Image (cartoon, rainbow, N blue to C red):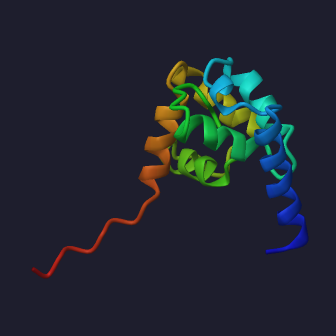
């Protein structure tokens, strides 16, 4: 593990140990406040914080606009000629609220390759 990643893990561990980051408290915060709290930890950026809200806190209206895979899926689903810009993607996603996370999961799933049929 790189020294930089070790410093990220130490920062996270220290915050959890001394209570400056309380994961239980995050459950009660509005999405944007929880994202900001997580984003303040070294090594945790906006995307990682969004994934935490979706997958660990079960938030239903998180839109990870900077996720390349999600934007590629939107391009494919909406039959766009090119990858949507951040602004265009946000406009496309306006109708997804308050279930942006659910739409996100479906779009990611749409990009998976189908499994080969079993020979059994």
From this viewpoint, is residue 75 visible? yes
Query: Is 116 left, or right, of 58 in this rendering?
Result: left
Q: Position of residue 17 (x, y in %)?
A: 78, 41
Quadrant of the image containing the C terminus: bottom left
In the image, farthest residue toward the left: 120
Residue located 86% across and 37% down the image: 40
Query: Is 39 left, or right, of 111 in this rendering?
Result: right
From this viewpoint, is residue 85 visible? no
Q: Quadrant of residue 86?
A: top right
Residue located 78% across and 33% down the image: 21
Query: Is 34 left, or right, of 62 in this rendering?
Result: right
In the image, farthest residue toward the front: 18
- In the image, 30 versus 67, the foreground residue is 30
- In the image, 1 versus 53, the foreground residue is 1
Q: How many marks?
A: 0
In the image, farthest residue toward the bottom: 119
Q: Quadrant of residue 47?
A: top right
Q: Image height check: is 117 above or below 51?
A: below
Q: Position of residue 20 (x, y in %)?
A: 83, 31
Quadrant of the image containing the N terminus: bottom right
Residue located 47% across and 57% down the image: 111
- In the image, 114 versus 23, the foreground residue is 23
Q: Position of residue 80 (x, y in %)?
A: 58, 46
Query: Is 37 left, or right, of 49 in this rendering?
Result: right
């Amino acid at each position: 593990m790189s020294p930089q990643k070790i410093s990220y893990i130490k920062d996270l561990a220290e915050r959890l140990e001394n209570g400056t980051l309380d994961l239980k408290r995050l459950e009660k915060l509005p999405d944007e406040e929880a994202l900001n709290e997580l984003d303040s930890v070294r090594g945790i950026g906006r995307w990682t914080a969004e994934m935490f809200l979706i997958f660990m806190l079960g938030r239903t209206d998180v839109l990870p606009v900077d996720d390349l895979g999600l934007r590629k899926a939107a391009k494919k689903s909406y039959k766009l000629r090119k990858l949507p810009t951040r602004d265009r993607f946000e406009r496309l996603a306006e109708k997804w609220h308050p279930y942006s996370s659910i739409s996100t999961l479906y779009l990611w799933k749409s990009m998976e390759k189908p499994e080969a049929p079993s020979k059994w």
